[in-house]
Amino acid sequence: MKKITGKMIIQTILNYCIYLLLLFVCLILSVTTTSFLSITNIINVLLQTSIIAVLSLGITFVLITGNNDLSVGGVMAVSGAAGIGLIKLGGWPWWAGMLVIIAVAMVFGIINGCVVSYIKAPAFLTTLATQFIGRGLALVISGGSSWYNLPEPFIFLSSTYVVGIPLMIIIVLLLYVVFHIRLGKTIFGRRVYAVGSNADSARVSGINVSKTILFAYMQCGLLVGIATILQVSRMNSFWAAMGTGIESQAIAAAIIGGASMSGGVGNLTGTFAGVLLMGVINNALNLYGVDANWQEAARGFVIMLAIIIDAIRNRYNSVE
Amino acid sequence: MKKVTAIILASVLTLVLAGCGNQEVQTEASVVETSPAQEEGSGTEEVKSETETAEEGRRYTFGISMPQLDNDGFKANLIGIQQFAEENNIELVVTDGKATADTQMQNIEDLITKEVDALVMCPVDSGAAAAAVKKAQDAGIPVISFDRNVEGDVLTGLAESDNTAHGAAAADLMAEVAEESGIEISDLVVLELLGTQSATAGLERHQGFEGRAKELGINIVASLPTEFKNDNAYSAVMDAFQANPDINAIFVPSDNACYSGAESALAQLNKLYAAGEDGHILITTVDGGPTGLEGIRNGYVDAIAAQSKLVMSEEAMNMALGVVQGETLEETVIRIQPTKVTKENVDDPALWANSINIKQ
C-alpha cells in the first residue's frame, strides 16, 4: 500500500484541474447570478456548445495522433453550401442533401489525411490550405448568399425534445459515449495513442501509422459533416460565412481539456469539460453583462490560465 | 483508475449542474420577486440599486444584439441606443455578434435566459438570424430590428434606412450642387459606382439614384461595380476615366465603404480638386461616415445623403419601449429618411459620424 504524500495530492489536483476549474466557475456563477443555475440556461449552454463539442471530438483524435486540423470551419462552409445548395437550388430531397454534406466533409478529411500521412506534409499547413479551399469553394457555390428555411427534417433535429432535453444535446452526448469507447476500448483507439506517443515504435510494433492518421482525419471529416448538419438545423439556414473561426475554439477546447499539441495525450471527458468550460465562460460574460469589448480579452485570459495550468502539470508529471 | 475517477467526477458535475439547478431555481425565483435589487450579478448591482430610487414604475431591461462593433456605423447605432436608454431610464445589456451569425445566436439565447423585456438587434445575416428571433418571440420577448431586416416575418418591428430615398436624395443633391456652381444639369457626365447588388442597401441606392437621375435628366455614362470595397472603387474610377475622360461627376453609394478608394484614384489621375477649383469633379455620396465628412471638409465631396443612424436607433428603441408598455405599434416598419449634408452642416453633432467622435 502506497503512502499518500503531498506530491500525490498536488498531482491529482493538477490532473483534474480542468474539472475543478469548471466546477469552480459553475459554483461562482450559481452563487452570483440568478439565471445561471436554471434548467433553461443549462440546456442553453449545452445547445450553444453542441456544434463545437462535435468538432472538438473529431479534433481530439487528430491531436492525439500528433497532428492538427485547422480546416474544420472551411469544410463546414463548403459541405453546407454543397448540401443545402442542392436542396435549395437543385430540388434534391433532404436526405440526399444531408448525405452530400457528410460526403463532402469526409472527402476533405480524406484529402487532409492522405496529404499529411502519405505525402508527409506538415498538418498545420495542409489543413490551413484545405480551410482556404473549403471557404473559397463555399463562396463559389453559394455566391456569398445565405439560404433560409430548410426542409422539415432539419427543423425536426433542432426543435425536438426528448423528455425535456433537446434532441441535439442527446445526439452530442451519444456521439461522445460512442467515441469515448472507440478511443478507450478499441484497437483503433490504442493505435491512435501509439502513433501519437511514438510513431517509430508504433511502426516497429506493426501498426500502419499512415493508415491510422488517415482514419483519424476521415473520422474528423465525418464529425464535421454531422456538426454542419446540426449547425444549419440550429440556425434553420445556411450562410456562406458559417464556421468562421470555429476551428480555433474547437482546438482550444480540446487542448484546455488536456489533449496535447505534440500528440499521445488526451481524452474525451477532458475535451467535453474543455468545451463546457468555454461555453460556460461565454454564457457567464453575457449573463454578467460584461462590456462586449472586454469579452474577447476575458476569454483569452481564461484560456491562458488553463494552458498555464496544463504546462505546470506536464512539467510536474515529467519530473517524476 | 484515473479513468474511473474522471468519469465519477464528470458525472458528479453533471449532477451538480442538472440536479441542484432545479431546486435552487425555485427558491431563488421567489427571492427575485420580493427583492429584485439584491439578486443579479455583481456587474449590474450598481445599476440595479438605482431601480429602487426611480420614482415611477419598474425599470425595463433591453437586450441589444449588435452584429459587430468594429464598424463606425454600428458604433453610431449603439450610441443612439445608449442615448435613448439614458433618457428613458432603460437598462441595457449589450452583446457583440463579432460579425458571426452563430455568435449572435448565442448572444440572443443568453439575452433570452437573462429574461430581458425586449430585444433590439441588427442581424449579422438576415436569414441565419431568423431562428434566434423566433426563439425570443416564443419566449415572449418582442424583437425590434434596425438597419437590416430579418427573413421569415418574425420581427415585431423594423427601423431601417429608406435606401431608395437615399439614392434619390444623392441625385437631387447632385443637381442642386451643379445648379449652384453654374453647370447645366444636361452637361453632367456621371460615373455611378455600384454597391453590392445582392444586398438591399446596394440595390435600392442604385435604383433610387438611377430613377431620380432619369427624372432630372442627368446623364449616367457608366455604372461600375465596387461590391462596397475601396480597392474595387479605385479600379472602377481609373477604368471609367480611361473610357470617358469627360466624366465630371461621381456618385458613391457608400462613402464609409468605398469613397477613399475613389478619391485615391482621382489623385492618381491628377483630377482631385476641391470645390471651386478648376477641374473639380462633383461628388455626391450616401452614408455620411467619417471619411465622407472628411471629404466634405476637404472640399472634394460636395454633398452627402447621410443615413440618420441616431434617429434610426431612437425609432427602434421607441418601438421596443412602446411594445413593452403594452401599446400596439401603428407602423411596424419605419423607413428612415436621409439627412442632407453639405459644407454648411458638416460639423452638426447630430450627424452620426460626429457622434462617434464626441463619444471617443
Image: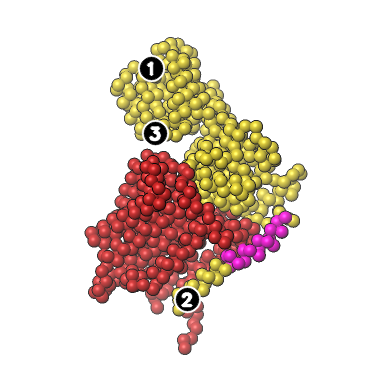
Chain colours: A red, B yellow
Amino acid type of the residue tagged 3 in the rendering: Glu
Label 2, label 3: how many angstroms apart (C-alpha)? 57 Å
- Mark 1 or mark 3: which is in front? 3
- On-image quarter of the C terminus of chain B: top right
Res. A191 in view: yes
Q: Is residue B10 above or below residue B93?
A: below
Which residue corresponds to mark 2?
B4
Which residue corresponds to mark 3?
B227
Label 2, label 1: how many angstroms apart (C-alpha)? 79 Å
Numbered label attached to residue B289: none
- Mark 2 or mark 3: which is in front? 2
Circles 1, 3 touching at the beta carbon (< 8 Å): no
Amino acid type of the residue tagged 1 in the rendering: Val
Chain letter for mark 3, please: B
Q: Which residues are magenta?
A: B16-33
For the point 33% across and 63% down, which residue is it?
A216
Residue B212's x, y, as percent?
A: 47, 19
